[in-house]
Amino acid sequence: MKTVLIIAGSDPGAGAGLQQDLKVTTLLGVYGLTVVTAITVQNSQGVTAVHPVAPEVVAAQLDAVLNDFPVAAIKVGMLATPEIVHTVAERLKGLGGIPLVLDPVLAAGGGFPLLTADGIARLTEELFPLTYLLTPNAPEASQLAGIEIQTPADLEEAARRLQSLGPRWILAKGGHLPGEPVDVLTDGINAYHMPGVRLAAPNHHGGGCLLASAAAAGLAQGLSMPEAVNRARDLTAQALKYGLDLGRGTGPVNPYAPFARELARPEVLTALQTAAARLEKGGIEPLIPEVMSNLGYATAYPEGPQDVAAFPGRLCCGPRGLLIPAPPAFGASRHISAVILTAMAIHPDLRSAMNVKFFEGLDELALSLHLRTASFERAAEPPEVKAQEGGTLAWGVASVLNPNEPPPDLIYDRGEIGKEPMIRILGPTPMSVAEKALALKNALLAGGRL
């Protein structure tokens, strides 16, 4: 296993600093070694104090690690004082050939200063020449390069100026600039503008630490600079998109999201097969509509229909009961995916759904079963939505969900010309959905309505 030496401050909330770096390196299959430079007092609401580690203790930590462990890459974050900057630079001078990723942490997100002017001067004079990749955001690049940055062209100019000060590569991050974000990667000769997507990411604490440590992990594993940077940017985008709403302020990014998605895929298929067997044993056939049913289940943090599994050929009635033409597969149902993905965007726990036959008196029967209902009218669908293939279900489900209210168990519509009335059953798992479907069937049977 390759190793990355992490030289950074400690964040007790574990959203940034060496705690975040360790999470990222572990997830990417690299072993993180740590040297603590400062103890911060902070939470999701901001930094209130910084207690630098004595330079001689930082030096002793570096000696202990470097004299014992092989180091494939180095990631440097918060250094806190000019003396620590100098100590780190002196200890790393003789390590030629090991790529060093420097995240120039100058201030906390809330503006709390994390390095003095003297410290910044030493950073540029002593550490920049040792740096393989420098990863400033736009405000940091502006401060370090001494120019105002308003556009990607300005960001490129700042990156070129910083590269001339010693770092082999600069990745200048444009997330703070207006418009769609553009990062600039340059080696001083070529400059690559790398566009991204503007995300509504209220929980973004630790994003810069994540990107730098992910890039260091990639370099430790032998990736080229573009490969390491692209993988780090992709992971950062996922972590920002699925940031965790923890604490009372800005929550941390979530680097586990894409790994959770992939790990869930086998469990998703197994859960669908188990629930289908329950529906078959429970005799769900009376609730199978003319267009047939389907049962779907999404992975955690789904990106699209490719992350929602359902049954190819749907679930239908055969001569001996429920017929399941094929085992579940991902991307098998556009319609059930639209229901689940729309529901998850508002209530992330609603990862499963099934469509069944509509019947009158549903509201009253559901009430007796302690199930919540909601409905939408297809006639109220805007023409521009109706014109989009598959847009009706997403519109209908979104129209009845409220993030501030408990979600319904059942969403129904009475159809229209050419469209069969339908109930969509929602739940966190396929088995919970299957049990709701069978509860409806059994209640109808007990009431003599089947």
Image (cartoon, rainbow, N blue to C red):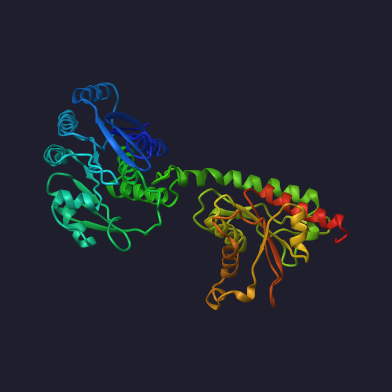
The image position of residue 275, as x and y in percent, is: 70, 48
Q: In which quarter of the image is residue 120?
A: top left
Q: Residue at x 82, y 58 (%)?
A: 444
Residue 391 at x, y percent in the picture: 56, 69
Front one among 139 and 126: 139
Vertical relation: 138 (above or below) 6: below
Residue 435 in the image: x percent, y percent?
Answer: 73, 49
Looking at the rendering, which quadrant does residue 264 occupy? top right
- Taking depth in this image into account, of 34 and 46 the one nearest to the observer is 46
Q: Is 391 drawn above or below residue 312 in the view shown?
A: below
Toward which corner of the image does residue 74 lie, by quadrant? top left
Q: Does residue 376 appear left or right of residue 123 in this picture?
A: right
Residue 295 visible somewhere in the drawing: no
Residue 45 coordinates in the image, percent (x, y): 36, 43
Direction from residue 262 to residue 366 in the image, left or right = right
| Residue at 61%, 55% in the rendered image | 407
Query: Residue at the spot x=28%, y=21% of the render?
Result: 68
